[in-house]
Image (spheres, rainbow, N blue to C red):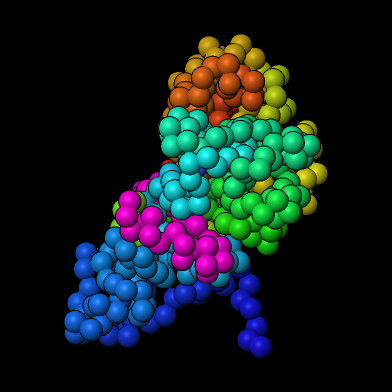
Amino acid sequence: MEREMKFATKCVHAAERPDPIFGAHTTPIFQTSTFIFENSRQGAARFAGEESGYVYARIPPNTPTNAVLAEKFAALEGGEAGQTFASGMAAITAVLLTTLKMGDHLISTDVVYGCTYSLFSEVLPRLGIDVSFVDTSELENVKKAFKPETKMVFLETPANPTMTICDIKEIADMARAHGVLCVVDNTFATPYFQKPLELGADLSLSSCTKYIGGHADLLGGIAAGNRDFIKSLAPVVGYTGGIMGPHEAWLCIRGLKTLHIRMERHAENAMKVAEFLESRPAIEWVRYPGLQSHPQHELARRQMSGYSGMLSFGIRGGIEAGRRLMDNVRLCSLAVSLGATDTLIQHPASMTHACIPREVREKVGITDGLVRLSVGIEDPEDIIADLEQALEKV
Ligand code: LCS
């Protein structure tokens, strides 16, 4: 049997093949909306799904550039196949519309990205789909949430923005025992630090806008799983059209070539920043999975091979103090999104998670005093110096 490539080698080489026409070393951007059939029989066979191949850029496999990205990402997640999308939200939407119907029930982690929460709490009930938000860090809660109508468990771990961790393996086992799908949003950890499919999940999805693209210059989404599940997404992808453009796919391919190096540096810097913040009297608490003080640190150690670059903290003086901190950073940018090369700071309660009703937010720990940091790959001394000078102004 052929030896399996290590992760770093997959980042660089997986799915890459020289262009057969001109021998271009990198994957070309196939900037086309449609594909020419050799004859009418071939066109009909492709539409009928009797022959694989490209048809039209909205219809999976979209374009050869998208296909290379999907295959590379699947190799990194340990899945058989992948599918690209216009954004992380388009990926989640396509998965829901493919797998759920009126009368079904979804169990979701209670702390999820704000738009995911709104999609689950506002749109799904309108379609007759019932959603239970549960604190999935307590297995007992998940166990109790299953109903005869449950069709999917959706996990976000580490969760945005509280960094709460849940046990993917235990929950995927429970889901399987109930004949229910387990889908994991792996955006925060990336396949470099966490492999949901190896832990038993049916699908691992990510916003490519974050660490996959890695440079804050694109929107995209992606999912990996077994071939049949990925194939089942194709009709909804084609009918709803939330597809990734070939140029974005090419940027993601380029981004993935350095994923392993970037993630190492993000995590190394985040640990240093987390320790710095924890040492400051002005900081009430810090949540970073790599810290001993994280409530699920032991689980994170078992489930992840590193702790990624995201952290949140509470500052004494609440939101007013947080505002002064955010308004006084110079190197860090005050911006939503995450996973960029530079350090981003933002306030979830009034920004990324403002769409969640206050009482729900407070109950799950997205308090007014919580500040979120996406630690970049700058020199950590410069990030810490910037936070230090901003803290002095609080
Ligand atoms: N999943 C997670 C965990 C996210 O953090 C986001 C976006 C998405 C899915 C959706 O991805 P998108 O459609 O934006 O590609 N999170 C954002 C955030 O925390 N700030 O701005 C966007």
Q: Quadrant of the N terminus?
A: bottom right
Q: Quadrant of the C terminus?
A: top right
Q: Position of residue 126 (x, y in %)?
A: 43, 32
Magenta segment:
216-240
Residue reaching furthest to the bottom: 1
In-image side of 50 versus 343 (left or right): left
Q: Position of residue 144 (x, y in %)?
A: 74, 36
Q: What residue do we see at 60% from left, 66% from top?
A: 78
Q: What residue do we see at 32% from left, 63% from top?
A: 59
| 280, 39: nearer the viewer | 39
Residue 163 visible in the shown view: no
In-image side of 68 versus 152 (left or right): left
Q: Position of residue 117 (x, y in %)?
A: 51, 33
Q: What residue do we see at 51% from left, 37% from top?
A: 129
| 307, 94: nearer the viewer | 94
In-image side of 268 versus 368 (left or right): right
Magenta run includes residue 236: yes
Q: Is residue 262 above or below residue 269?
A: below
Please identify the quarter of the rendering in which residue 359 is found. Answer: top right
| 321, 185: nearer the viewer | 185
Q: Is residue 150 above or below residue 318?
A: below
Magenta run includes residue 353: no
Q: Is residue 64 above or below residue 99?
A: below
In-image side of 297 versus 347 (left or right): right
Q: Position of residue 39 (x, y in %)?
A: 19, 84
Q: What residue do we see at 37% from left, 68% from top?
A: 61
Residue 181 visible in the shown view: yes
Q: How many marks?
A: 0
